[in-house]
């Protein structure tokens, strides 16, 4: 009954990484033509950095880690 249990358990991380990589690639693929123009590249990078800063500040404020 438990012959292949640990074998299956050790296969789940590989499956998880594969699924995450597939989601990442399918999310980024439509944006690749936009990255060929410098203006849209700068805009997308600014949007990414801005959203990362927003999430960071929001989490710091929610957790009481900031001294702002």
Image (spheres, rainbow, N blue to C red):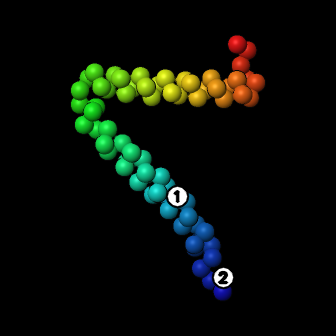
Could you give the CA–CA distance between mark 1 and mark 2, rounded to whole angstroms? 22 Å
**Residue sitting nearer the eye, 14 or 26:** 26
**Residue shown at the point (37%, 48%) measured from the top left:** 25
In the image, farthest residue toward the bottom: 1
Q: Is residue 41 above or below residue 3?
A: above
For numbered disc 1, what is the local secondary structure?
A: helix
Mark 1 Cα-neighbour bin, 10 Å: few <14, some 14–19, many ≥20: few
Q: Is residue 64 above or below residue 11?
A: above
Q: Is the Cβ of the residue at disc 1 closer than 8 Å to that at disc 2?
A: no
**Where the C terminus falls, by quadrant?**
top right
Q: Which label number is shown at residue 16? A: 1
Residue 28: percent from left, percent from top: 36, 42
**Residue shown at the point (76%, 24%) measured from the top left:** 64
Residue 60: percent from left, percent from top: 68, 25
Nearer the observer, disc 1 or disc 2? Answer: 1
Q: Which residue is mark 2?
A: 2
Could you tell whether 5 is left or right of 20 in the image? Answer: right
Mark 2 Cα-neighbour bin, 10 Å: few <14, some 14–19, many ≥20: few
Residue 52: percent from left, percent from top: 53, 28
**Residue shown at the point (39%, 45%) measured from the top left:** 27
Q: Earlier in the sequence, mark 1 or mark 2?
A: 2
Q: Which quadrant of the figure has residue 55?
A: top right
Residue 29: percent from left, percent from top: 32, 44
């Amino acid at each position: 009954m438990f012959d292949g249990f640990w074998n299956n358990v050790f296969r789940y991380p590989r499956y998880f990484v594969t699924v995450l990589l597939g989601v990442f690639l399918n999310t980024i693929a439509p944006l690749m033509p936009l990255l060929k123009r410098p203006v849209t590249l700068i805009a997308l990078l600014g949007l990414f950095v801005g959203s990362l800063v927003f999430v960071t500040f929001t989490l710091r404020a929610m957790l009481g880690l900031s001294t702002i």
